Structures are given as structure tokens and as C-alpha cells.
Image: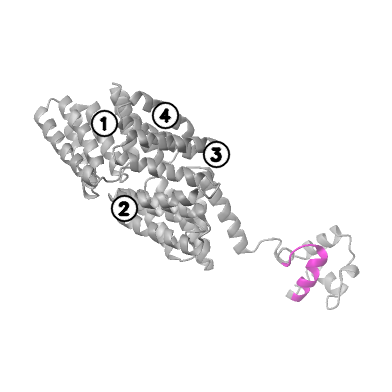
Amino acid sequence: MGQRLRRLRQENGLSQRELASPGVSYAYISRIEAGARRPSVKALRQLAPKLGVSVEYLETGRDLSDRDQRELRLSEAELTLRLEQDSPEAEAEFAALLAEAQAAGDAEAAARARAGLGELADRRGDFATAIEELEQARAAGVLSPLTHADLYATLARAYSASGQPRRAVELLEDCLSRVQAQAPEDVSAEVRFATYLSYALSDLGELERARVVVRQALGRAQKTPDPYSRVRLYWSLARLSLMEGKPRSALRQIQRAIGLLEATEDTRQLARAHLSSGEILTDDGDPEQAQTHLELAEKLLGDHADAADLAWLYSEQARASLLVGEDDAAERLARQALSLLAGGDPLKRARAYATLAEARPEEIDALQAEFAQALEVLEAERRWPAAASVLRTWSRALRRAGREQAALDVLDRAAAYGVRGSGQPAGER
């Protein structure tokens, strides 16, 4: 410290006498510089302003306290998380920061580190770990939906992906009510949580409630210039139209979202919009046009897509390839999707297994158990249109395998689900 004091004094062109002040004599300063004395807090506070530095820097050589340094590292890790979809360095840093924050009793930093770890676990499809980390981050009580919306959105997504849509609805209802009560002027936050809530409600088959939530938020969104608010709502309306068997209406809403996203240069969300378009077009029997959108989505996702987006891409590419007669490509893509979907979205898993079975009917017996397990989840969640759709694909696979009667039985089951869906449609993501 004595060397630092001497350097700073000389850089400021001050003699020891010129630096001295009442209570801090030049002789005292000389002894500090010689390493013979350690200055008191009072002396540091008198010397630091004259030298143009903080007391912290004069004493330790650092401008930031341990807490401030931790804040800086956390902010850098969070920024890396936003900019890079797959970052082992960020995961290691969040883990280190969590340990440091816990040791220092820094509850907010610990919660933020857990939120980062939960987000990374969600991206790689490890929903159990994501839920564990995010629930602990939320339970700390220091990160609100207004300041850390991503935490709550990711936790809701992990609940839905792990077959717990009711928990997602309860979480998002709480978030929406808190935003409306605590920041009624924050339309963007309200729209964001309203959109996520509409997804979760539709997964439970509560389409009317979902539509009311979206319409109310859309009315609010007209008063804000934020394009993302309208993008989210158009996307949600497209999803509802698709579940109601109105693919052309869904496409119109998605095209509106794409137009707004192109203006924002948000390539990740634009990629997802093209993925949605491809999914709708495949469902509507237009695989060639679907492939055009899926190719655009693949280019936009680039080399840093997360596991969920890649699984969605491969699953939809496999379905479109199958419908245009490219069985080898359909097989390869379905297997790629399944490698990323362990414990993930049951609809995507069921679609991938059904597509693989149709492309390779000789493997249908080996695939039966896994397909049935994914289908059971769809049935338990009352997602009847989704269940009917994958059963129709499975029926085609049985027909290819030469099992006509079994194919007809499955087709009858699909028709029964279709009837249920027309009475109370269920969500399909």
C-alpha cells in the first residue's frame, strides 16, 4: 500500500508536505510510504480525495468491493447467456459465483447465479435440473417478475415441457397479477406474461380463457410502440387458430409476426416464427412450402441454437421430408430430434417416433413402447388434436408395415380423439 500511495502522490505532482492535512502529517505519510505504518480509516478518507481515487482503491488497489466485483462478473455472465446459446464458460462462472455468493451471504447474487444455471439446464433439455435451480432462485424472494422475467418464463416453460402445465398456469397467473398490481404502466411486461399464460392455458385445453387473456393484452399493446409485444400476441393468436383447426388464419397471424420481427433484426425469434410457419404448413398438407420456411429457420438459428429449438427444427424437417418422399432424410432427422428430446415435449417426441416408424416400418415394434409413452402424456394432458395427429401418422406407418387392421384400429382411435378435440380443443405447441 505504501508503494501505491507514493505512486499516486507522484502522479498527482504532490510532495509529502502538500499531501499532508490536519491529523495526517507529512511524517506520517512518509512512514506509510516506507511500509512502517498502516493508515487508519480516517487517514485513508482524507488522502483518497486529494489523490483522485476511492478509499477502496487506495486501501486495496481495487476500485470495486468484493460485492461489486461479484455484480460485475454476474452481469458479464448474464450477458454471455443472452448472446451465446451454448456457453460452458458461462455455466462454470455461474457455478463459481453461486458458491462465492453463498459463502458471502449475498442472497440476490446467489439467486441470480441459480437463475443462470437453470436457464442453461433448460436449454440442454434437462428440465428436472432447470426446475430445481429456478425454484430455489424464486424462493429466495429477491427476484421479481418485473426485474427478472426470464426466470419465471423459463420456469413455466420447464414445467410445461416436463408435463406439468397446471403448475405453469399457476405461476404465470401470479406473475401477471403482480405485474398488473405493481407496474400497471409496464405494458410490455404485461403482454409478455399474458402471452406465456395463454400458451399454458391452451396446453390444458382452456382455449376460451387463453383467447380472453390474449385479446385483453392486445388491446393494451396497441398503446405501446414496442414491436415485441405485438409479435408475442400475434404468435399466440396463431397458436390458438391452429388448435381450432384454422391453419390459414394461423398463417396470417404468423406472417404479421414475421413482418415485425424482420424490422427488429431479432434472428432467434424470427427463426422460431419460420419454424411455426413450417409446422402449420406441414399440418395443412403443404410440405414443399414448409421446407422453404424450415430452411430459413435453420440458417437464422446458425451454430448456436439451443437443444429445444434444434429438436423442434429436426422434428419438423423430418415430417416435411417424409411427406415429400425423402424417407432417408426423414429417418436421419427424426433420430436427431429424438437424441435431443429425452424427457422433453411429448408432442415432438410422439411426432418423431411416428415419423421414424413411417420412414422405417420394419422398426415399428421397437418404437412402439416409446411412442405409446409419449402418447399417454398427450392423453393425460387432454391434448386431443395433437394425439389425433400423431395417431394418424402411426396409422400410416402400420399400413406401410402391412398391418392393415391395426392401422384401421388406430385410425378409428384418432377419429375419436378428433371428435373430443372439436368439443374442447387442447394445446399443441
Position of 354 with respect to 241 (left or right) is left
Q: Which sits earlier in the primary sequence, circle 2 or circle 3?
A: 2
Q: Which sits earlier in the primary sequence, circle 1 or circle 4?
A: 4
In the displayed image of the protein, which residue is found farthest to the top? 325
Q: Amino acid at mark 2?
A: Pro
Pointer 4 local density, CA inside 10 Å: few below 14, some 14–19, many at least 20? many
Label disc, if present, on residue 165 of the rendered structure: 2
- In which quadrant of the rendered image does the C terminus lie? top left
Q: Which sits earlier in the primary sequence, circle 3 or circle 4?
A: 3
Residue 302 visible from this viewpoint: no
**Residue placed under numbered mark 3 in the picture:** 264
Q: In the image, which residues are magenta? A: 42-55
**Residue placed under numbered mark 4 in the picture:** 293
Query: Which residue sits at x=47%, y=35%?
Result: 258
Position of 234 with respect to 77 (left or right) is left
Give the Cα separation between the discs numbered 3 and 4. Answer: 19 Å
**Residue placed under numbered mark 1 in the picture:** 355
Give the Cα separation between the discs numbered 1 and 2. Answer: 26 Å
Q: Which sits earlier in the primary sequence, circle 1 or circle 2?
A: 2
Mark 1–mark 2 CB contact (< 8 Å): no
Q: Secondary structure at mark 4?
A: helix
Q: Nearer the viewer, residue 193 or 36?
A: 193
Q: Secondary structure at mark 1?
A: helix
Q: Amino acid at mark 3?
A: Thr
What's the image's color scheme? one colour
Front tag of 1 and 2:
2
Q: Main secondary structure of the magenta part?
A: helix
Q: Secondary structure at mark 3?
A: helix
Please say whether residue 43 is one of the residues in the magenta stretch. Answer: yes
Front tag of 1 and 4:
4
Give the Cα separation between the discs numbered 1 and 4. Answer: 19 Å
